[in-house]
Amino acid sequence: MKYKLMLDPTPAGYLHGFPKQVPSEAVAGTGHDLFILSSFDLTKWVVEQGYPEESFQYYRTWVEKAKAQGKTLGRRTVINDSVVNKVIKLRNAKKSYRAIASEIGVSSGTVGRIINSTGVADKITSI
């Protein structure tokens, strides 16, 4: 299956015909790991597609301003050193992903990501 990268500049993008497919020459990566090349002028393309430049620039300015103030954009992470240490300790005690997740209060997927990224899975023999 060939994936296409779609772009919607803001939630009001539908008023201007968005989401639209980003041109293939502006996209790199494969499968689920598609990204827009840094050499591609995204602002120019969005404006050419009919999105008002002042609205797009306002959004970009807002994001830059928030980042400059040290604000974190997006979802908060539940993974910190304390959680990682607890997961490693419990996994070394041969507890299952589900048991670890319910004890710590995170999802079993989060437990799996921590275990795979720390290499704990390689050290544990089957239970």
Image (cartoon, grey):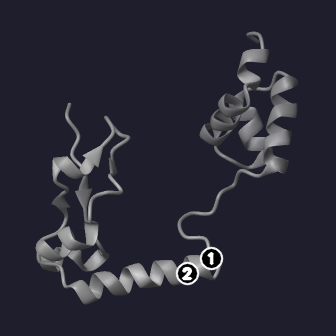
Rendering coords of residue 43 (x, y %): 26, 72
- What is the quadrant of residue 8 in the picture? bottom left
Looking at the rendered structure, the secondary structure element under dot 2 is helix
Q: Nearer the viewer, residue 77 or 46?
A: 46
**Label 2 or label 1, whichever comes before in sequence order:** 2
Rendering coords of residue 29 (x, y %): 33, 39
Q: Quadrant of the C terminus?
A: top right
Q: Which mark is residue 124?
A: none
Could you give the CA–CA distance between mark 2 and mark 1, rounded to whole angstroms?
A: 5 Å
Q: Nearer the viewer, residue 27 or 97?
A: 27
Q: Amino acid at mark 1?
A: Lys
Q: Specify few, some or many for label 1: CA neighbours under 10 Å numbering under 14, 14-19, or 20 or more.
A: few
| CB contact under 8 Å: marks 2 and 1 | yes
Rendering coords of residue 36 (x, y %): 32, 53
Looking at the rendered structure, the secondary structure element under dot 1 is loop
Residue at image location 73% in from the left, 31% down from the top: 118
- Which residue is disc 2 drawn over? 66
- Which residue is disc 1 drawn over? 71
91 versus 84 height, above or below: above
21 versus 10 height, above or below: above
Residue at image location 47% in from the left, 78% down from the top: 63
- What is the quadrant of residue 109 in the picture? top right
Q: Amino acid at mark 2?
A: Ala
19 versus 86 height, above or below: below
